[in-house]
Image (tube, grey):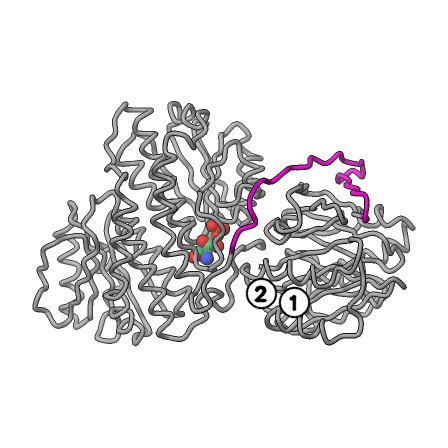
Amino acid sequence: MCGIVGGIIKGDIGSLLIDSLELLEYRGYDSAGITLMTDQSELNTIKTTGKINLLKQKYLQSNTKSGSIGIAHTRWATHGSPHETNAHPICSDDIISMVHNGIIENANELKESLSEQYTFMSETDSEVIAHLFRANIDQYKDPVLALRHTSLKLDGSYATAILSRNHPHKLFFSNFHSPLVIAITDHGHYIASDHLALLHLSNQFIYLKPHQHGYITLNSIHIFGQDGRPINPKIEVVNIVPPTIKRKPSEHFMLKEIYEQPNVIKQQIEQHTTHWNPLIEEQLHHIKHILIIGCGSSYNAGLTARYWIEACSQVSVQVEIASELRYRQAYHKTDTLIITLSQSGETADTISAFASLKKSNPQLTSICITNNNHSTLTRMSDFTIITPAGPEVGVASTKAHLSALFCLYQLAAKLNHAQAGQDTLDDPTQLHINLKQTLALHGNIKQCALQISQYNHVLFIGRHLCYPTVIEASLKLKEVSYIHAEAYAGGELKHGPLALIDANVVTIALLAKDHLYDKMISNINEIIARNGPVFIYTNTHTDPFENNALVNTIRIPSCQNDLLPFIAAVALQLLAYETALARGCHIDQPRNLAKCVTVE
Ligand code: AGP
């Protein structure tokens, strides 16, 4: 989603900002822009639709490349089309230039009151911030006070970086429910919506908290709370090597990340005893209910975990889509453990749902499972479990999803141990080897994908642990290949979806050798009887459909049933990838989607 970088340094900042912007590319965007302030305090803005390399070309061709203070942005359209006029920075004449992440919910109302005085040039909600800040500077004569009053008027979520030509040595910022981080270097200060954009420049960061605002200069940092009082910021030293988010030129990040999964899981297996905070394990002795919250693939991981936890403990599990839970009036028992799942740790829906839950149930303990140690969710939670997946660039979550799933598996096993003194879940210590064996099936899966890519409708079916696994597989397929895909529990077919079945709808069935095997076979027969082609992914050796022309069977490595969600996830990720490749889709940055969904 939108990305912000800015800074004030000794020397020219333009190309540094564009380099940093490139590191935010993976989040997804449709236009980009930069404003540099010249030594004469003029604001020079360059914007473009499309990719950052176009912005780079425009910048290199421009006559105004110098400036030691600047802001830059990648925009993912919410209000207004992905047009150059709507790209950020957004200006209030040549006085203010501003970049914004988030959504201003009362933009229309503010626009009404500001439009007598100012001409609105874009269709964005963001433009109100630029004009409002300018109006407030005129009124309060003090830019910090003006910024505070601007923030107080905004409803919704925002992170901003703002330049004012009348305050040439300051870069202003404000934030509420949209991340913003300041980096300290020996040559000046930077600001960004994600430390990934600045890790190559610094390892000292200040992570801003909601409702903070202020400004950076070349030599100083000034942060204020909502009440206007100065805040002494906590500087965190981040000892992580700037991630290599590079790949071979021919390869997609999604494929690279799929192939990294055996190593990620191996690492988690090895860290099983050392990596977990003993205080988390202590919690597991007492809890009676677990509430899992997430969106998309993270939510799907929660759905799978429910089966494991229910099978090995007396703990009840509720799994909720964050954007729905947020607006429900649900009652939660006092001995409930909240688990938020989010690879980015910055998903606005999950953050809002969790924030309102915490507000109404302050006594509940919370654990966040995330791939981002410095995220908003991490800061909000009592405990954090970091997935060791490393940076994930492909918009479709693969290794971060699998890693979170494995954390949940470990959590279920620890719960089982803490509450019943037993280890009833299947031993996962060889899982990474099974995953490697799954990757070895790539060629077979590709053949299957070539056929699937011919269809416009795909129905996934599964039962028990295979059901949430196919929900995730269907999300992955539609996300990257744009094929309409739906997932149903096998038992639900006769309650509606069977009406869809004919030769034009292909079914992908995930078949486990478990207690529901015979029932799944019946479900597959129901489809074949209606002339529906079926691809079966299975860990069984028997094949009741051996000579059936409508059925193709793909044998995934044989494994214990508790571990099938991992094996099947990887096989079905490869299927989604190869199907998307066959259809010529933008695999790493699917249309309309973003890696980090920071707006509700
Ligand atoms: C997964 O492939 C998707 N890109 C998407 O559903 C994602 O899982 C969802 O947006 C939640 O993201 P999060 O894990 O960062 O919270």
Q: CA distance from mark 2 to mark 1?
A: 8 Å
**Residue 32: mark in rendering:** 1
Q: Of helix, strand and loop, which one carries label 1?
A: strand
Which quadrant of the rendered structure holds the N terminus? bottom right
Q: Of helix, strand and loop, which one carries label 2?
A: loop
Query: Which quarter of the figure has residue 578?
Result: bottom left
Expressed as whole percent of the image width and height from the top left, the position of residue 536 reads 20, 61
Residue drawn at x 17%, y 63% is 553
Q: Is residue 122 left or right of 514 when viewed as pictured? A: right
Give the residue at mark 2: 29
On screen, residue 154 above or below 31: above
On screen, residue 45 above or below 13: below
On screen, residue 295 above or below 127: above
Is residue 231 highlighted in magenta? yes
Residue drawn at x 34%, y 64% is 576
**Closer to the camera in the image, 398 or 415:** 398
Expressed as whole percent of the image width and height from the top left, the position of residue 65 reads 77, 68
Q: Residues within 10 Å of mark 1 (few under 14, many from 20)?
A: many
How many badges with numbers are in the image?
Answer: 2
Q: Amino acid at mark 1?
A: Ala
Expressed as whole percent of the image width and height from the top left, the position of residue 124 reads 68, 66
Q: Residues within 10 Å of mark 2 (few under 14, many from 20)?
A: many
**Residue 57: mark in rendering:** none
**Closer to the camera in the image, 310 or 376:** 376
Q: Amino acid at mark 2?
A: Tyr
Residue bounds of the magenta highlight? 217-244
Examine the rendering and report whether any part of residue 323 can be seen. no
The answer to whether marks 2 and 1 mark residues whose Cβ atoms lie closer than 8 Å is yes
